[in-house]
Amino acid sequence: MKPYISIIIPLYNKEKHIKDTLDTVWSQSFTDFEVIVVNDGSTDGSLQKVNSINDKRLKVFTTENQGCLLYTSDAAD
């Protein structure tokens, strides 16, 4: 069954902030959602932090650095 909502989080070199961001999402009382993180070619440890999270609601996509407007529409498809 598809989740009720999808949350798309663009990610580019936010290693220090991505875990707090995701922890905030996970702490919501509403749970029928998926989180789509679109890594826009990060060169720090951002992707490794996201990949260390084990939650079935999390989907991760990686692209070459293109800017968030180009890939958020792809993630929504």
Image (spheres, grey):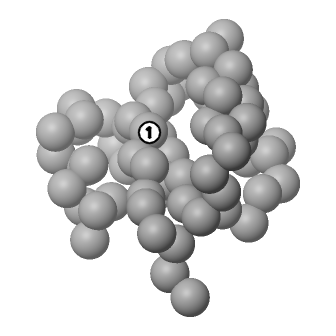
Q: Please name the residue shown 62% across and 15% down the image.
A: 17
- Measured as percent of width and height from the top left, residue 39 is found at 46, 40
Q: Residue at x 74, y 66 (%)?
A: 56
- Which residue is label 1 attached to? 9
Q: Toward the viewer: 19 or 39? A: 19
Kind of residue indicated by mark 1: Ile
Q: Is residue 48 above or below residue 6?
A: above
Decide: few, some or many residues near mark 1? Use Cα within 10 Å; few <14, some 14-19, many ≥20.
some
In the image, is 56 to the left or to the right of 47? right
The residue lying at 26 percent from left, 71 percent from top is: 77
Q: Nearer the viewer, residue 55 or 45?
A: 55
Q: Where residue 58 appears, x then y in whole percent?
A: 64, 57
Q: Is residue 61 left or right of residue 49?
A: left
Position of 75 compared to 47: left or right?
Answer: left
**Residue 20 at x, y percent in the picture:** 69, 20
Going 25% across and 35% down the picture, which residue do you hit? 68
Return the residue found at the far bottom.
1
Does residue 60 show up?
Answer: no
x and y percent of residue 9 in the render? 44, 39
Residue lying furthest top in this view? Answer: 16
Q: Is residue 65 left or right of residue 15?
A: left
Q: Nearer the viewer, residue 33 or 58?
A: 33
Tell me if residue 44 comes above or below residue 40 in the rendering.
above
Q: Quadrant of the N terminus?
A: bottom right
State whether residue 35 appears in this view. yes
Secondary structure beneath dot 1 equals strand
